[in-house]
Amino acid sequence: MQTVSSQRGEMSQDSGAPALHPEVVRHGKRTDQAARAGKRAYDALSASSVGLELGLSVVIGLLIGYYLDKSAGTGPWLMFLFLGFGLAAGFRGVLKAVTRAERAAEANARD
């Protein structure tokens, strides 16, 4: 027994859907607009995570230093050392984010 397909192929390429304007297809404006919007959203999310990255790197440095101080019995010295490492890592992340934001601004200005 053969079943008859109830689909008429409305989603196929020959469905009679309106074709894109040749200018849009040729220059890719529709794709470029969506890609630019996605890139701007990614850049905004990347820039908004800078504070979290700085805070986490400092806290992680403090926790590692505290644990090492407890294990070795060295007092607060390793905690201060790893606090410095955490601050350096956090500010390095901030500088990288600023550089990324500047590059993104230059790319948006060119487009």
Image (cartoon, rainbow, N blue to C red):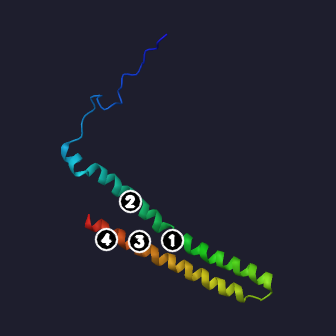
> How packed is label 2: few (under 14 Cα within 10 Å), some, or many (20 or more)?
some
| Earlier sequence position, callout 3 versus callout 2 | 2
Q: Residue at x 65, y 83 (%)?
A: 82
> Which mark sits nearer the N-terminus, 3 or 4?
3
Residue at numbered disc 4:
106
Q: Callout 2, which amino acid?
A: Lys
Instruction: Point out the frontmost of discs 3 and 1.
Output: 3
Q: The residue under label 3 is which amino acid type?
A: Arg
Q: Picture quarter containing residue 43?
A: bottom left
- Mark in front: 1 vs 2: 2
Mark 1 closeness class: few <14, some 14–19, many ≥20 residues within 10 Å: some
Query: Mark 4 or mark 1, which has the lower sequence index?
Result: 1
Alpha-carbon span between mark 2 and mark 4: 13 Å
Q: Are marks 3 and 2 in contact (CB under 8 Å)?
A: no
- Circle 4 crowding by C-alpha within 10 Å: few under 14, some 14–19, many from 20: few
On the image, numbered disc 1 is attached to which residue? 50
Residue identified by numbered label 2: 39
Mark nearer the viewer, 4 or 1: 4
Q: Position of residue 26 (x, y in %)?
A: 21, 48
Res. 100 mark:
3
Residue 102 found in image quarter: bottom left
- The secondary element bearing badge 3 is classed as helix
Label 2 vs 4, first from the N-terminus: 2
Residue appearing at x 35%, y 27% in the figure? 10
Near-viewer residue (41 or 26): 26
